[in-house]
Image (cartoon, rainbow, N blue to C red):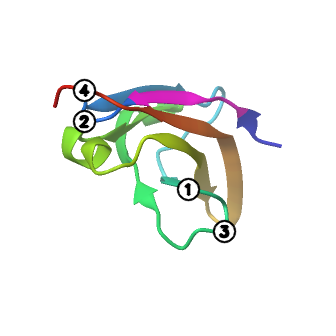
């Protein structure tokens, strides 16, 4: 079962969240993360995955200011999965709240 962790993003700003998966070497892993308006939506926004220390299970997920500006304010769902060989693990999931901004 995935860890539940909610994210809060200000519309029109750059967003980065560091993630650590303890005791997992992600050197050979494929990591993916997307957010959608709901789990059944066919439209998704992909987070950029940036390695920090893959041997220590550390990486970040991020969205550019342009990406967050294009999102409507409200609630979305997201998750992060990693694949090593034939093993797929859903590590974290939760709600993304996009907060509207008056200035951007």
**Disc 1 to disc 2, how far (Cα)?**
18 Å
Please report whichever mark, 1 or 4, sits nearer to the chain's N-terminal start.
Answer: 1
Q: Is residue 60 visible?
A: yes
Instruction: Name the outermost residue toward the left.
Output: 104
List the residue tagged with mark 2. 12
| Mark 4 and mark 2 residues within 8 Å of each other at the beta carbon | no
Total numbered labels:
4
**What crowding class fits label 1: few (fewer than 14 Cα within 10 Å), some (14-19), or many (20 or more)?**
some
Q: For this rendering, which residue is in front, 92 or 103?
A: 103
Quadrant housing the C terminus: top left
Image spot of residue 18 (x, y percent): 44, 26
Can you give x and y, in whole percent of width and height, for residue 1 in the image? 83, 43
Instruction: State the residue position of label 1.
Output: 37
* Magenta region, residue range: 4-9
Q: Nearer the viewer, mark 3 or mark 4?
A: 4
Q: Secondary structure at mark 1?
A: loop
Pointer 3 residue: 40
**Mark 4 or 2, which is nearer the eye?**
4
At a point 47% along the width and 69% down the height, the residue shown is: 43
According to the picture, the residue beneath numbered tag 4 turns out to be: 102
């Amino acid at each position: 079962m995935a860890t539940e962790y909610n994210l809060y993003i200000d519309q029109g700003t750059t967003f980065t969240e560091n993630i650590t998966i303890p005791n997992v070497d992600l050197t050979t892993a494929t990591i993916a993360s997307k957010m959608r308006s709901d789990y059944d939506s066919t439209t998704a926004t992909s987070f950029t995955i940036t390695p920090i220390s893959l041997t220590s299970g550390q990486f970040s997920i991020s969205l550019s200011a342009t990406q967050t500006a294009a999102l409507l304010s409200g609630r979305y769902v997201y998750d992060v999965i990693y694949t090593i060989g034939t093993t797929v693990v859903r590590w974290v999931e939760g709600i993304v709240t996009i907060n509207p901004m008056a200035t951007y």
